[in-house]
Amino acid sequence: MIEEKRKNPTQRKLFGLFNHAYLAWVVLLIGFIVTGAAWYTSNEFVNKNAELRFETRTIEISKAIRSRMAEYEQVLWGTIALFRASREVDRQEFKIYVDALRLQENWPGIQGIGFSIPLTPEQKLDHILSIRAEGFPTFDIKPPGERDEYSSIIFLEPFDWRNRRAFGYDMWSNEMRREAMTRARDTGEASTSGIITLVQETQTDVQKGFLTYLPLYRLEMPISTVEERRAAFVGWVYSPFRMGDLMKGILGEGETNVEYEIFDGTELTKEALLFDSNNVFHAEDADSGELWSRTKILNLQGRTWTIVYTAGSNQLTEAESAQPTMVGAAGLVVDLLLFYIISSIALMQRRAEKLATDMTEDARGARSELEAKLIELEQSNNDLQKFAYVASHDLKAPMRAVHQLAAWIEEELENVDGLEDTDVKKYLAQMKGRADRMQKLLDSLLAYATVGENQQEISSFETAKCIRDVIEFVSPPEHIKIDITGDMPRINGEKALFEQVISNLISNAIKHSGVDSTRIEISARPLGTFYEFSVKDDGPGIPTRHHERIFELFQTLKRRDEVEGSGMGLAIVKKLIERRGGVITVESDPDVRPGTTFKFTWKSTITV
């Protein structure tokens, strides 16, 4: 009930919301919505990121193909340069030049570099006989048959078993090749053919291919017009390409998560398919599961290639694929935990309210009993203080009488002869000492019982002057020097009680000082609304195990008969200081260095 009262209205209103069970369902619904939004956002982010990678990869592949074909064209232009530099290039020179290019290492994908010349029907027989005379007795132009125009491949390096199949082949006889050859001859530029099956192909690992041609013209003849170029035309430098080997040379053999299909022209049909990276025609694969698709157009040596890129879920990494699921799962866990926590709070709140109601009823009955106990305890404490006061006050008179009686007997015995050396005088002195000690004990007990009971006069006083007055009253021995160090404050309070505290602490330091010279320092410093006073001596010190004990009643660190006093001085000081909101502590460790410092706080201003 006390805690409930401490809450402000806003806190009670907010906490009261949890008392309603439907709030848990509202939070659960909101949690599901937020979790769904988080899953959607995460899924969109992952897909956008993968789509960006896909787009970047398509650009890289397109750029790699265009760049590599431009490089291969330069290789063919280099071969043109060979023919122009050497007017008569023989078979051996051609071989040396191509071997130096190291095609397989530096230009993967090129099947070879060849040279083909045009022939008329009248030139055909002489050409065949000429090549046979070079050591090729079975040479002939292929395919056989009568045609209006012929061409013949006379150089093709490397001259391996695959390229030997194309030696003497009439590429002009094939319409697809003839189109590209005509375009190269008439334009003077590189020209790539459409899809063909190379003569070099066998029955295994059949790949679609194409050829790229460059025209060779006579140097001394003009080539500004088509007619001039046809008149100056000598032959074609060309390269055959197997599409699979070419793409392997461009992109490597590593698997890619981007699938692509290259079409000759703009028709996306299976007949126009030049290359397929996964050998699965995507238009016929209903289960391809593609998420992204891009189409790029490449114009290469007078030919248009269309590249269709596709990618599916394999474009996502394992971490990306799992991310939306993890976000959704984590959100659901949090939603259910919140539902459980809020439901539990509502249940516990209802139980707490029922318990509070029951406790309120019980408390009403117990409150009157508690108040009665407090009144009884207060009365008992007052009775105890009154008893201590009466006991100490009433016993003082008999003790004075005992002391006076001992003094009277001692005075009477002065006139009795023969008693000078007896123990009677010693016993009487002990009786007087015991009576004095009892008198002091009763004074201390009376002082302890009345601490804080009597209202003291409030005044403004200089603590430095007050302390000097106490020192003058105490009259310390000559070997003890008491110094007031630093600035001492002016305070508004109970001067008599302050003097009592200072007097007790100075007397305590003197009482426990050694026989040698002792120095006592008194200082003060501000501490908030209090001042902290310090009484420091260089005496033997107090072991740390006795620090709590010295503030207890009737406690002394020496035997009773070795010290003066009742053993209540520090107890009175402690009670007096604490009754006024202060604290007193002791700092001393004889094992480290001698000396004892008592510190106490005293309020800077007391008002009534």
Image (cartoon, grey):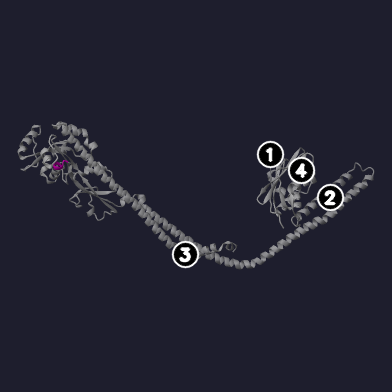
Which residue does the numbered mark 1 point to in the structure image? Answer: 593
Residue type at numbered disc 3: Leu
Q: Tell me which segment is drawn in magenta.
A: 184-188
Is mark 1 in CB contact (under 8 Å) with mark 2? no
Q: Position of residue 72 (x, y in %)?
A: 21, 39
Q: Quadrant of the C terminus?
A: bottom right
| Closer-to-camera residue (194/304) | 304
Could you give the CA–CA distance between mark 1 and mark 2, rounded to whole angstroms? 39 Å
The structure residue drawn at horizontal position 38% and vertical position 52%, both measured from the top left corner, is 323
Q: Position of residue 193 (x, y in %)?
A: 16, 45
Is mark 4 in CB contact (under 8 Å) with mark 2? no
Answer with the quarter of the image where residue 330 lies: bottom left
Q: Position of residue 317 (x, y in %)?
A: 34, 49
Which residue does the numbered mark 2 point to in the structure image? Answer: 435
Instruction: Classify mark 1: helix, strand or loop.
Output: strand
Please tell me whether residue 243 belongs to the stretch shown in magenta: no
Is residue 206 visible in this depiction of the protein?
Answer: no
Is mark 3 in CB contact (under 8 Å) with mark 2? no
Predominant secondary structure in magenta? helix
Which residue does the numbered mark 4 point to in the structure image? Answer: 510
Answer with the quarter of the image where residue 476 lies: top right
Instruction: Classify mark 4: helix, strand or loop.
Output: helix
Q: Quadrant of the N terminus?
A: bottom right
Q: Is residue 248 left or right of residue 349?
A: left
Q: Is residue 429 left or right of residue 119?
A: right
Which residue does the numbered mark 3 point to in the structure image? Answer: 23
Residue type at numbered disc 1: Arg
